[in-house]
Image: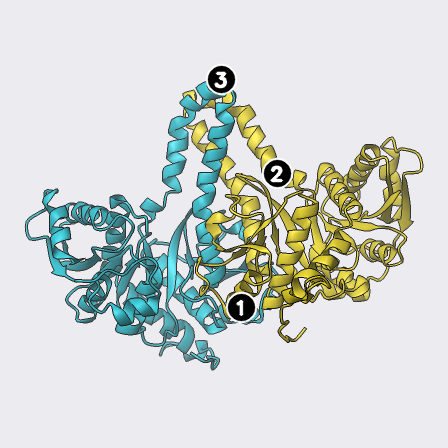
Chain colours: A yellow, B cyan
Amino acid sequence: MIKIAVDGMGGDYAPQLVVEGAVQAAHLFGDLEIIITGREDAIKRELYRHKVPGGKISIRHASEVVAMSDSPVQAIKKKKDSSLSVAIQLLKQKEVDAVVTAGNTGAAVAASTLNLGLLPGIRRPGIAISIPTLHGISIAIDVGANINPAPEHLLQYAIMADTYARHLLKKKKPTIGLLNIGEEESKGTEALQEAYKLIRDSGLNFVGNIEGRDFFTGKCDCIVCDGFAGNVVLKMTESILEMMITLITKEIQKDFLARIGAFFCKPAFESIRKETNYEDAGGAPLLGVDGVVIISHGISSAKAIRNAIRVARESVVEQVNERIIDGINSYMNGDSSSPSKSIPIHKVNP
Amino acid sequence: MIKIAVDGMGGDYAPQLVVEGAVQAAHLFGDLEIIITGREDAIKRELYRHKVPGGKISIRHASEVVAMSDSPVQAIKKKKDSSLSVAIQLLKQKEVDAVVTAGNTGAAVAASTLNLGLLPGIRRPGIAISIPTLHGISIAIDVGANINPAPEHLLQYAIMADTYARHLLKKKKPTIGLLNIGEEESKGTEALQEAYKLIRDSGLNFVGNIEGRDFFTGKCDCIVCDGFAGNVVLKMTESILEMMITLITKEIQKDFLARIGAFFCKPAFESIRKETNYEDAGGAPLLGVDGVVIISHGISSAKAIRNAIRVARESVVEQVNERIIDGINSYMNGDSSSPSKSIPIHKVNP
């Protein structure tokens, strides 16, 4: 049995759609046991609406709720009995194998980092997201946990992304690109120039710098980026599809024939909407913390929650964190069989 | 007469499309005199292909060409007789009123900054671009000249954007947003937090932080951003439309009815392509340098060059640089009539 704690009060549509997504996941995966954290009465009320497979879902009461607008520090210091904190505590005490939350991202990162600690050798956690590209799914890391990464952090993001792509996306030798403002090694900030060298010399399948224009072309399987640019790009992506649809609809309304045409194109548009939909991506793993934590979008639907639980389950099954430790050992410290791979680790302030 | 130097060898399709665009502009604007810099024989050959209005276009020979791959330092130090350098020299010596180049952006920024110097009070130049949004044109600054801006640089970008939006986009009281990873004042790097305060207290029409999702919604008229994130976003935007069209085409090909539908939708698609087309944007002004310099896209078509020349002409007519000096004086130093507006300028390394 795989046990997953779901933050029942996190997200714009919590607890309603969170509970619905958890129920869907419980039906879908026979090997899951789900504990929903949060206000017992509210969650119970939602559970009553559904047919829940016997013994698969339980509730752990938590009296407080982290608001989307709470600062991470506030959330952690002042709301010790929040649905988020209780879920993370369950993971810390090994009562569950993973946590899924659609709540306040900053609070989730802070609570996980402080309570679970980092994997051995890891200096900073990073949020990884799946990106639909012209050539399948790529992953980008970091998209918001670390807005001022040191070169070593970026190298570790590359290693974590490589691990994730190998084991969850089943890519054989994932290609790694570094998001920069030009392809040449000399481009970008000093931290990026240094990161370029570290990743190039690491033994990873590094394809060099990539630019904004390569983000959706699938030029590489893993895009390593600073959390600031990654976050801006991620949020922009979410809005740009909506903008395109608004523009298309507006233009089509102007013309009678186009309106007829659009009717026939509808299935094609729907299919694109689906291909580029965050709901199917399945949540963003917070990589580097000592425990499986999946952050789902604040506006998560039941389907998005269900898919985030799926990704949490796969991360446990594939032992992603154990693989990350292996990756760090072999790419950064040189594993016992090939100590020549060893890379000097620059001293930086944590 | 307004005199404009056009870098005849800059851009992927130079000199052919650059000359063609210059000829179009000469026909369109009766008050223009254009000097094309570059290899005389090559430019002459191109000019012979067109009907050129009498006395409107001349050539200034330059023996060298800055390649797209040249580093800015290489370009400036080793190619003193390049078409770019010669154009900038013409501007410096007041033989022309503005320069248009579709060549190497880094070299254009460096050559302009070093040779023309900055406007009084300005600490760093910034590249501004026009963005088509759901509510008309917005401008974003900086998109690549300054990848590590100090708070004061960002304040000055806000002032320059305000000036540009007032006088070239004819917006009455342009709204200013700061690109960040969250709306709260406490979000982002220290430099952004400090910039937030400076812009808020400047007297500009500041709407606060905006996120990636607001980039194309027209939430504000002017988007102030660090050159790194701005550059990534800009390049991503260019590719995302192509990606959408590829996806739509692929999906539509799968289905016979959709293919018929798409036929009727074609005018709508074309209209969107046009609305979001860089060609119409008219090049990106390099604001803050002591002279009007417009940078056009490397893949500029004749139409893009023509529109960049149009923007150069308007910048001269509207006296953008004089207005920027006024703006800096009134928002940063406090103008003589209201010295209380004075804002302390933090000491930073240049």
* Disc 2 residue type (three-letter): Asn
* Disc 1 residue type (three-letter): Glu
Quadrant the C terminus of chain B occupies: bottom left
Measured as percent of width and height from the top left, residue A126 is found at 67, 58
- Quadrant of the rendered structure where residue A307 is? top right
Q: Nearer the viewer, mark 2 or mark 3?
A: 3
* Disc 3 residue type (three-letter): Phe
Measured as percent of width and height from the top left, residue A181 is found at 46, 59
Which residue ends up furthest to the left in the rendered image?
A: B54
Mark 2 and mark 1: span between their CA atoms? Answer: 35 Å
Q: Secondary structure at mark 1?
A: helix
Measured as percent of width and height from the top left, residue A310 is found at 76, 41
Subunit that carries the residue with mark 2:
A
Quadrant the N terminus of chain B occupies: bottom left
Q: B300 above or below A109?
A: above
**Disc 1: CA contacts within 10 A as few (<14), some (14-19) or many (>=20):** some
Mark 2 and mark 3: span between their CA atoms? Answer: 25 Å
| Residue at the spot of label 3 | B256
Q: Which mark is residue A277?
A: 2
**Which of B49/A243 is in front?**
B49
| Residue B49 seen in render | yes
**Disc 2: CA contacts within 10 A as few (<14), some (14-19) or many (>=20):** some
Subunit that carries the residue with mark 1:
A
The residue shown at (80%, 51%) is: A99
| Residue at the spot of label 1 | A194
